[in-house]
Image: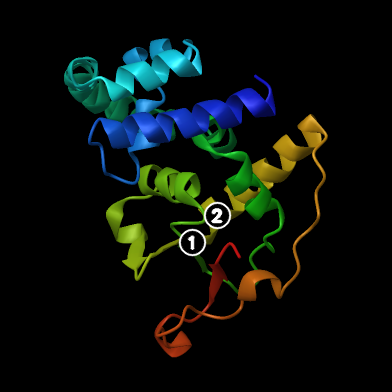
Amino acid sequence: MTPQQRDREARAVVAIARACGFGQPVAPLILRRVPDVERLLRSDDATIRRVLGDPQLRTSLRSGLMGGFEATWKQATLERIRLDHPDWLRAWWLPVTSSGELDRLLRTPPPRSDDKRVGLARRAYPATAAAAEVLLDREHRTDLDGYLLVERRIAAAILDLAHEVANEEGAAVTGGSGSFGGADRPPEGIDPRDHPYVAWWHGA
């Protein structure tokens, strides 16, 4: 799959999730592997727009996705145990990661040696946050004012894969700097003393 095809499918899955009423942040990551969605993605953009724009076709699609969503969620959680992080991320995270999110990751500084967690801005890193929701049990992640705090090992694995994919595809890697997007600065209204040893990935 080319980067352009991946980007097109990532955007299409988000549109499918929204049109069918799947509002969970993790929904695109799961729906991408549901057979009905995989079949729809093989259609052209005009067909996808027609299905999503027709109330009857959209309702039929949604009813078929309900059971598929639950079964695919179970598959994702089982594979997180069976697969190493890089293999799981290639199978589940990469197909729903837009070119914009990959670019933001490539310009994000890696966690410092004393960082224990990373605060991901959900709006800037939706696929990354969704992957963390599957890979980490609830007690190992924290929602905080539009950010998801995750274990450093998960964020580092995703960042490593983003650079690996960029090298494979010959993408320009601009490199992160310690001050990019205020990575050392917590979001406004959050006291750093309440959340020490956190790298903040704002995405801008």
Nearest the viewer among 169 and 17 is 17
Q: Is residue 183 visible?
A: no
**Which of the two residues, 100 or 140, is positioned nearer the viewer here?**
100
Q: Which residue is mark 1?
A: 120
Residue at x-position 42% and y-position 29%: 13
Query: Residue 51's x, y, as percent?
Result: 32, 17
Residue 25 percent coordinates (x, y): 34, 46
Q: Is residue 180 above or below residue 67?
A: below
Is 22 positioned to the left or the right of 165 in the image?
left
Q: Inspect the image, locate mark 1, and give the three-letter code of the amino acid beneath it.
A: Leu
Nearest the viewer among 10 and 95 is: 10
Q: Residue at x 20, y 22 (%)?
A: 55
**Image marks 2 and 1: residues in contact by CB distance under 8 Å:** yes
Which residue occupies the foreground of this view, 6 or 55?
A: 55
Which mark is drawn over residue 54?
none
Return the x and y of residue 87 as percentages of the image width and height.
56, 30
Residue depth check, mark 2 versus mark 1: number of the one nearer the observer: 1
- The colour scheme used to paint the residues is rainbow
In which quadrant of the rendered image does the C terminus lie? bottom right
Q: Amino acid at mark 2?
A: Ala
Is residue 170 in view from this perspective? yes
Residue at 18% over, 21% down: 59
The answer to whether 149 is drawn above or below residue 188 in the figure is: above
- Residue identifier under label 2: 155
* Circle 2 Cα neighbour tier, 10 Å, few/some/many (<14 / 14–19 / ≥20): many
| Rendered position, 38 above or below 193 | above
Residue 123 as seen in the image, left or right of residue 68: right
User: In which quadrant of the rendered view does residue 1 lie?
Assistant: top right
